[in-house]
Image: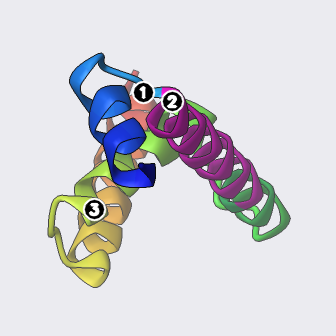
Amino acid sequence: MRNDMADKNRDHGDTNSETGSSYLSLQRSQMIRSNIHNISQLLNTGLSAETLDICIQLIEAGVHPQTLAEVVTQIRNEVASLEKDD
C-alpha cells in the first residue's frame, strides 16, 4: 500500500520534497557565498560581491584557483597602470 501511494505521488508530480530540497540547497549556497564574501573582506581582497561571485563560478566550472588569482592580479596591475597614465 505504501508503494502505491509513493507511485501516485510520483505520477501526479508531487515535488514537495524536491522543492524543499532545492530551497535548502539555495539557502545553503547563499550562506556559503555570504561567508566567502565576509572572508574576502576580512582579507582585504578588494573584490566586490559580484566579482567574487564570478570568481566562484569560474572555480566551480574548473578554472584553477591559482591561475585565476594570477589573472585577477594581472588585471588589477594593468588597470592601475592605465589609471596612473591618465
- Indicate the amino acid at tag 1: Thr
Identity of the residue drawn at 66% across and 57% down: 32
Residue assigned mark 2: 19
Q: Are marks 2 and 1 in contact (CB under 8 Å)?
A: yes
The disc placed on residue 15 is: 1
Task: Say what secondary structure mark 1 lies in.
Answer: loop
Identity of the residue drawn at 40% across and 21% down: 86
Pick the front one: 85 or 65: 65
Label 2: few (<14), some (14–19) or many (≥20) C-alpha neighbours in 10 Å:
few
Pick the front one: 77 or 9: 9
- Indicate the amino acid at tag 2: Thr
The disc placed on residue 60 is: 3
- Indicate the amino acid at tag 3: Glu
Residue 34, compared with residue 8, is above or below; it is below
Residue at the bottom extreme, as displayed: 66
Q: Nearer the viewer, mark 2 or mark 3?
A: 2
Label 1: few (<14), some (14–19) or many (≥20) C-alpha neighbours in 10 Å:
few
Identity of the residue drawn at 76% across and 58% down: 35
Q: Main secondary structure of the magenta part?
A: helix
Which of the 4 quarters of the picture holds residue 71? bottom left
Pick the front one: 32 or 76: 32
Q: Which residues are magenta?
A: 16-35
C-alpha span from label 2 to label 1? 6 Å
Residue 25 in magenta stretch: yes
In the rendered image, residue 65, in percent from the top left (x then y), is placed at 31, 77
C-alpha span from label 3 to label 1? 27 Å
Q: Nearer the viewer, mark 2 or mark 1?
A: 1
In the rendered image, residue 58, in percent from the top left (x then y), is placed at 24, 54
